[in-house]
Image: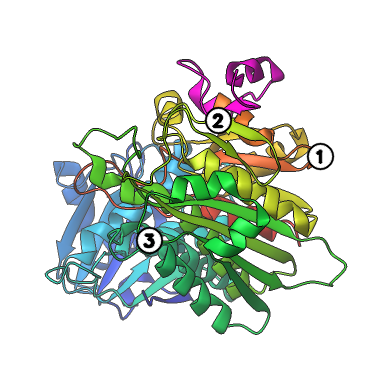
Amino acid sequence: MSLNLSLLRAHPAHIDTDAVVAAVFEDTGLSPAAQQLDEACGGRIARLLESGDVSGKAGRCALLLALDGIHAPRVLLVGVGESSKVDAGRFLKAAAESIRALKGGPVTRIHSALTEIDVVGRDADWKLRQAALAAFHASYTYTTTKKSAKASPLTALSLSGDDAAADQLRIAAGIADGVTLARELGNLPPNICNPAYLAEQAGHIAASNDKVSLEVLDREQMQALGMGSLLGVAQGSANPPKLIVLRYDGAATDQRPHVLVGKGITFDTGGISIKPGPGMEEMKFDMCGAASVLGAFLSAVQLGLRINLIAIAAAVENMPDGASYRPGDVLTSMSGKTIEVLNTDAEGRLILCDALTYAQRFNPATLIDVATLTGACVVALGKHAHGLMSRDDALAAELLAAGDASHDRAWRLPIWDDYQPMLDSVAADMANIGGKWAGAITAGCFLARFTEGQQRWAHLDIAGTAWDEGRKGLATGRPVNLLVEWLIGRQ
């Protein structure tokens, strides 16, 4: 979507816009911008606060129309809780709820004064970038295959701030492009977004920038490389697999690249170990790891980051038919290690292991894989935090810090060798599942076997965070924000 961002330092009552947004505190009442608006309209806002028609409770919105003395025809007051306890979560909730409250109406231009309030532990740059990102996120509407849906009419957002911080809006717009791409790819139905479609979208990214190149490996090329694990998953589908490799040269040629690898199961039936029918439609989201890697790559290119970056999307469909791989099969991975298949619904790690082996030919400075990998991670962490696993403490700390800075948070889980025996097999070098317990961790331990010798490797399990569950759930675009925040810090 297109959203024009700008900074404005003016009296909120005098701004030429369709709606002005200001904060209300639960304990101290009106924020400075709300006080200015109240003075302009003769104290009407204060009276509404006193009567209880306006609330400072976090996320509560009140829309006021045609206030005398205020140029904008609408004033939206949004609660942020107690003035001394406005943290990142409450601020972002207020920023998002204010857009949601207005996007269904005729409003095309909004001015938000939320960036004037103090946020615990955050500076002005953070408030501007994150308020803009929250606006992009909240105003997104999926319309591609839903012809009755109407896109948000919002075209312009001005934020209270000084021109010196204008670069934060540029960064926000670049990140938003990547988040929107990841969301759109995730939301598309699987009869459209198949492996070939993902490769086509990668082609559009490559064609838009002369520093980007693309290679797409087909089945025959992967066979020549010995990718028996990835191809085993793919063999039951009429849609051929693709290994999509995007390369961005934003730094000197002697600078080792950072490599992002994404799981791109464009639809996951579970294969022969077929999933239950109810909720299976959500398995179109099983490619959100690949979508987020492509989104983060697009953002890095849009922002012109001074790094070398490679994004690898392993795009496969997991389907049951007469050619499907079976429980009991033994697959030979690109690394030469053999894998006993105990469950064909543990397919993500089987495509990632070959993609991770392939990635190491680029001698990566850092290798990060992103995957909607395990239901066990959702059980452990719910819908708020990504599961992070790494044997490198410094890399784990960097990613956790990037998640905190962007409020796209992760939580570190152990990946100790103590868990490795759970993957033992009598028929192969390892099994593809580890049993009943610690499913997220044993999946990470499986992938770790294919990154030996790669010190700076991390695994992000986004099974709980990549989409909102339910019939009306949509892709979130996470963890693009975290990844781009981390990439910005690698310059």
**Mark 1 vs mark 2, CA separation in Å:** 19 Å
> What label does residue 443 carry, if any?
2
Residue at (28, 73) in percent of width and height: 154
Span highlighted in magenta in the image? 412-441
Image x and y of residue 104, in percent: 17, 65
The C terminus lies in which quarter of the figure?
Answer: bottom right
Regarding mark 3 in the picture, which secondary structure is present there?
Answer: loop
Q: Residue furthest left?
A: 148
**Mark 1 vs mark 3, CA separation in Å:** 34 Å
Which residue occupies the foreground of this view, 267 or 310? 267
Image x and y of residue 448, in percent: 67, 34
Residue at (52, 77) in percent of width and height: 203
* Dots 2, 3 in contact, CB < 8 A: no
Quarter of the figure with residue 266: bottom left
Residue at (84, 72) in percent of width and height: 253
> What label does residue 293 carry, if any?
none
Counting residues from the N terminus, which is met first, the one under dot 1 or under dot 3?
A: 3
